[in-house]
Image (tube, rainbow, N blue to C red):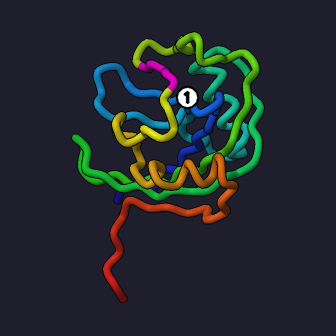
Amino acid sequence: MRAIEVVVRGTLIRGSFLMLSHQKGAANTFLPGGHIELGEAAHAALARELEEELGTEVEVKEFLGAVEHSWQGENGSNHEINLIFRMECGQLETDELPLSQESHLEFFWQPVEDLASVRLEPSALIELLPGWLFEKSNSGWGSTINNPKR
């Protein structure tokens, strides 16, 4: 039996632009972040992941919400819980592409109103993020899994 993965992701906003990442050559994109290690606090994991991926320190702010995500991959079914935080970093601006410290990743700035065009995953974030980021919505939960009616 496969385990459910717990992932921490961060939102970095500059005006109406959100920093996203993707694996080189991949069609989908995602918020920056990564896996939480055993015994590691979620906010510490996000700070560590961004330090590894971008070579810069970020300040992890408030928890925005969580999104469960399930998909079929090369190795079968996958399931993860994404914990989403707001973060700040004074060193990254939209006039320059953030440079990745990892050869398989690329970072870029995307208008928040156009997240669907870059296949943001989990796709539930396309509708949730504008509320979380700009309207201070506290819905806090999303899912890409369709549950049968009970």
Write the residue at 45% across / 48% down.
Answer: 126
Residue 55, quarter of picture: top right
Residue 53 lies, in percent from the top left, at 57, 21
Q: What residue is drawn where x is 47% and y is 54%? A: 127
Q: What residue sits 51% from the left and 24% below the top? A: 109
Q: Position of residue 71 (x, y in %)?
A: 30, 52
Q: Is residue 35 above or below residue 70?
A: above
Query: Mostly what secondary structure, the magenta segment?
Result: strand
Badge 1 amino acid: Met
Looking at the rendered image, the quarter that the N terminus falls into is bottom left
In the foreground, 5 or 116: 116
Assign the C terminus to one quadrant of the image.
bottom left
Residues in magenta? 105-109
Give the left or right position of residue 73, taking residue 143 as reference.
left
Image height check: is 22 above or below 127?
Answer: above
Examine the structure image and report whether residue 107 is included in the region drawn in magenta: yes
Q: Is residue 109 above or below residue 113?
A: above
Let me know if residue 99 is in the magenta part. Answer: no
**Does the rendering let one see residue 101?**
no
Q: Position of residue 95 (x, y in %)?
A: 59, 12
Mark 1 element type: strand
Q: Nearer the viewer, residue 132 or 66?
A: 132
Any part of residue 122 in sight: yes
Question: Which of the 4 image quadrants contains residue 91?
Answer: top right
- State the image coordinates of residue 44 (x, y, percent, origin top left): 73, 37
Residue at point 22%, 41% (across, down): 74
Q: Residue furthest bottom?
A: 150
Q: Which residue is mark 1?
A: 19
